[in-house]
Image (spheres, helix red, strand yellow):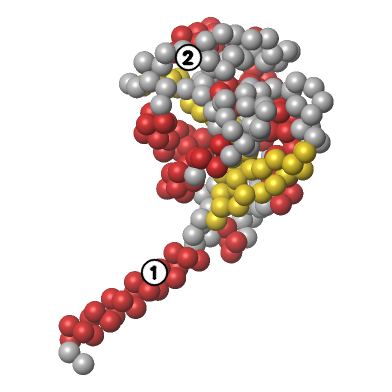
Amino acid sequence: MPVRLTLVLAALVVCAAAAAGAVVARQVDLDRRIDSHALGGSLHALVELPPGYEKSGLRYPVVYFLHGLPAGPATYLGNRWLARVLASVGPAILVEPQGARAGDPDAEYLDHGRGRNWATYVSEEVPAYVDSHFHTIRARGGRALIGISAGGYGAAMLGVNDLDRYSVIESWSGYFHPTDPSGTRAIAGGPGSNVHRLVATLRKDERQRPTFLAFYVGRDDPHFRTDNETFARELSRAGIPHVFALYDGAHSASLWQKHAARWLALALGHLARPTR
């Protein structure tokens, strides 16, 4: 057999083996239906498992990621690109819960009463389901809550209200009090809905157990820059450690995609590592 053909065949064998390995170690995404008492029905969550999950025997930290609002029932499926970014940063499970449904597009991740308790569904029922069905680190040190825009508000509001459950909270172009669908008018959201008013709670808790709190916004964000800067000043005055960044850009997917790797790395850097 000619040397060149031998080398070509050898290369093909190596490539085939690598491809087979890639299949074995591929990411797995699962669209799971979750029965919710809080919402009076079944909703969904996209669960992205890291490469090698099935054979590793490890328990993984979990990043819960909330999408923006107003939204449709299938919006939770629209951020699959995040799983690829997360896999390039480090091993973790990514969970993207459904945050809206037909006839209820902008609940602001709040509890509104029977059949509309979105906060309870997202912050309690989804993690309980994930912990019971996947190899997770079942402690606050293994959970991050992150979101974009209204999801950033949801992450900040739910995270600060549930510090027993989450040790990492990040808001990407979010805000810190509930708004109407336009994002321009504050609305009443009930106790615990205004994160500005939870600074004292966060300060008291910080003395007992650290929480990594980080948020950013675009310089040209038409609605939420001021609210982010105000919140950063409030945290600084209260002596609460936090990370705040102001980036060039507006309120757009290009901004979030540009900075996703860095901010996911920040989250994983403050979570427990995979463990047996």
Residue at the limit of the structure toward the front, as seen here: 103
Residue 271, compared with residue 190, is above or below; it is below
Q: Nearer the viewer, residue 179 or 22?
A: 179
| Amino acid beneath label 1 | Ala
Q: Residue at x 49, y 59 (%)?
A: 26
Q: Judge from the rendering whether residue 254 lies leftward or rightward of residue 119; answer left or right.
A: left
Q: Residue at x 46, y 13 (%)?
A: 223
Picture coordinates of residue 252 (x, y %)?
Answer: 41, 26
Look at the image and tell me whether residue 246 can be seen. no
| Amino acid beneath label 2 | Phe
Residue at the limit of the structure toward the bottom, as seen here: 1
Answer few, some or many: residues within 10 Å of disc 2's Cα (few below 14, many 20 plus, some between 14 and 19): many
Residue 167, compared with residue 42, is above or below; it is above
In which quarter of the view is residue 128 placed?
top right
SS of the residue at dot 2? loop
Picture coordinates of residue 257 (x, y %)?
Answer: 40, 35
Numbered disc in front, either 1 or 2: 2
Image marks 1 and 2: residues in contact by CB distance under 8 Å: no
Q: Judge from the rendering whether residue 3 lies leftward or rightward of residue 75; answer left or right.
A: left
Q: Which mark is residue 224?
A: 2
Q: For the C terminus, give its image quadrant.
A: bottom right
Q: Judge from the rendering whether residue 4 lies leftward or rightward of residue 114; answer left or right.
A: left
Picture coordinates of residue 85 (x, y %)?
Answer: 43, 44
Look at the image and tell me whether residue 217 can be seen. yes
Give the Cα distance between marks 1 and 2. Answer: 46 Å
Picture coordinates of residue 117 (x, y %)?
Answer: 75, 27
- Residue under label 1: 18
SS of the residue at dot 1? helix
Q: Judge from the rendering whether residue 13 lies leftward or rightward of residue 107; answer left or right.
A: left
Q: Nearer the viewer, residue 140 or 15?
A: 15
Q: For the N terminus, give its image quadrant.
A: bottom left
Instruction: Compare marks 1 and 2 and give the one earlier in the sequence.
Output: 1
